[in-house]
Amino acid sequence: MKLTYLIILALLYSHNLSAAERLNDSASPRQRVMVSLDWVERDIATIDPGDKLHAMVTHILGLEIRLDTSAFIGKTARIFLTLPTHIRGINNPNGMRMTWTTQGVFADGSVIPGNRSQIFQGEINDPVLLDIFNITLYINARYFTSGLEFNPIYEIEVQ
């Protein structure tokens, strides 16, 4: 009984060591970006064939992201970009996909609402990690209501 209790405590403790912690991105310039959605005119292999007629796209270029990593200097970590499950303007999480390219501090990637994508893995050497994101949003018009608004969440897991 005691051994089982100790094993459970050890597992809980090790799980908490790797739990994701939210990073502060308040140093990022806050931008309310006005975008216009265009119909996708070309075939995109990553869009479900049934959704191609409803595919819309927009681009957000040069979005500066600054993450406060001062508490993690010298530690090896993974950083994730997470989209909330509920996005204002989309009535179904499958109605949007965000892809991005960066200038190299963070990795290029893709994510849908309710999921996360790893954007960094390695040793944290700077108090602030900064990169420029060029974002493409793919929207399924069947799930688009109006006034798209969201804030990505950045999380860190120390390894």
Image (tube, helix red, strand yellow):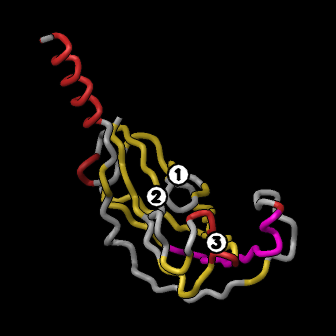
The disc, 1 or 2, on the residue closer to the chain's N-terminal end is 2
Tell me the residue that label 3 is attached to.
137
Considering depth in this image, is 58 or 159 the residue closer to the camera? 58
State how far apart marks 1 and 3 are (Cα). 15 Å
Give the residue displayed 50% in from the left and 48% down from the top: 118
Q: Which residues are magenta?
A: 50-63
The disc, 1 or 3, on the residue closer to the chain's N-terminal end is 1
Spot the residue most to the right: 42
Query: In terms of secondary structure, where does tag 1 sit?
Result: strand
- Asked if residue 67 is positioned above or below residue 58 in the image, the reply reads above
- Asked if residue 85 is positioned above or below residue 1 in the image, the reply reads below
- Asked if residue 80 is positioned above or below residue 60 in the image, the reply reads above
State how far apart marks 2 and 3 are (Cα). 14 Å
Instruction: Say whether residue 89 is left or right of residue 7.
Output: right
| Disc number for residue 82 | 2
The disc, 2 or 3, on the residue closer to the chain's N-terminal end is 2
x and y, in percent, of residue 81 in the image: 47, 57
Spot the residue most to the left: 2
State how far apart marks 1 and 2 are (Cα). 6 Å
Q: Which quadrant, please, contains the C terminus? A: top left
Could you tell me if the residues under marks 1 and 2 are in contact, i.e. CB atoms within 8 Å? yes
How many C-alpha atoms fall within 10 Å of the one at disc 1: few (<14), some, or many (≥20)? some
Tell me the residue that label 1 is attached to.
117
| Disc number for residue 131 | none
How many C-alpha atoms fall within 10 Å of the one at disc 3: few (<14), some, or many (≥20)? some
